[in-house]
Image (spheres, rainbow, N blue to C red):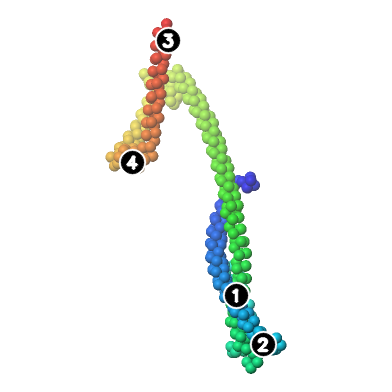
Amino acid sequence: MAAKQVNPTRMELTRLKKKRITAIRGHKLLKDKRDELMRQYLDLVRENMEVRLRVEEGILSANRNFVIARAGMSEAALNTALMAPKQEVGLIVDEKNVMSVEIPTFTSKTRTADENDIYSYGFAFTSSDLDGAVKSLSDILPDMIRLAECEKACQLMAAEIEKTRRRVNALEHVIIPETEESIKYITMKLDENERSTQIRLMKVKDMMLEDAHKFKEKDRIEQKKIREKRAANGLCVYCGKVKSDENFKTCTKCRNKQKIKKRISDAKKNYKLDIKREWVMNGKCWFCGEPVYNHSKLCKEHYVKSLVYAKKSKEARIKNEQARTAKISAANDESSRK
């Protein structure tokens, strides 16, 4: 479906190739991001479990101490002792960036640095169990803050992991396959157009060659008629201006020109033969002058062509021999029937 909606042009093909490269690079980056988020998420989950166990143990110990303190004190004395807290705790909320995820960080800060300010009562009318309960709650306060931080971080990172996973799946299973399919479709269409254009040019070339051949044939016939007419009138068949010499159809001047042309042509052929002989003596190909291949007198290209030509010639010879043998056997059978 995607291949039918694109415009099969080279500009569109270039754009889609760039898009595919960007998508593959983005897929790799998102996959690495997902893996790193999963690793950090698992570390946070393990830390969260450990902190939760410590908090639960601390709360259980504090509750146990409160129950014992309540059993040894009256309810009015206990309420009076805990009515007005002496220490205050402030919470500073900040954020840190972990793989493009803004995770909150909590930092606790007390009003005073004295550890004994957690007790808001005198020691004369309270029991030591109440002191232990208040001390237990004070000790687990940093773990509770860290637990809240881990819980929130796990929630945010889980949401980011899910979002990243969807993007990775969309790139891997939708965008990249559709882009590759579109590139394949455009490539096939461009190749088809190129082949059709090449075939059209070959047809035009054949038509032009055919017209040129007909023109040459027509010109050759006309030249032959002109020469026959000149010979009948006793003129030189080449120039037609002067009379031809005795026992010749040409004049002396035209005959000398033809001899010079033949000498030049022979000299060119001999020069080419000398060059080819020099190539062979220097260990080069007879046809193109490239280095020889496989201890032969030809380069790799002409060596392969010669092998193909020899194979085709052998097949044609065998085919002709079979046809000739079949023809002879058919003739013998026909003669034997008669």
- From what the image shows, is residue 191 above or below residue 321? below
Q: Position of residue 138 (x, y in %)?
A: 60, 83
- From what the image shows, is residue 24 above or below residue 211? below
The quarter of the picture where the C terminus appears is top left
The residue shown at (58%, 45%) is: 185
User: Circles 3 and 1: CB distance less than 8 Å?
Assistant: no
Q: Position of residue 82 (x, y in %)?
A: 68, 87
Label 2, secondary structure: give it. Answer: loop
Q: Earlier in the sequence, mark 2 or mark 1?
A: 1
Q: Whole-Å distance between the Cαs marked 2 and 4?
A: 109 Å
Residue 110 in view of the camera: no
- Mark 1 lies on residue: 56
- Mark 3 lies on residue: 334
Q: Earlier in the sequence, mark 3 or mark 1?
A: 1
Q: Whole-Å distance between the Cαs marked 1 and 4?
A: 84 Å
Q: Amino acid at mark 1?
A: Glu
- The residue mark sitting in front, 2 or 1, is 2
User: Circles 1 and 4: CB distance less than 8 Å?
Assistant: no
- The residue mark sitting in front, 3 or 2, is 2
Q: Residues within 10 Å of mark 4 (few under 14, many from 20)?
A: some
- The residue mark sitting in front, 2 or 4, is 2
Label 1, secondary structure: give it. Answer: helix
The residue shown at (40%, 30%) is: 312
Q: Whole-Å distance between the Cαs marked 3 and 1?
A: 113 Å
Q: Earlier in the sequence, mark 1 or mark 4?
A: 1
- Mark 4 lies on residue: 293
User: Circles 2 and 4: CB distance less than 8 Å?
Assistant: no
Q: Residue furthest bottom?
A: 124
- Mark 2 lies on residue: 73
- The residue mark sitting in front, 1 or 4, is 1
- From what the image shows, is residue 172 above or below residue 100? above
Q: In the figure, is residue 286 to the left or right of 133?
A: left
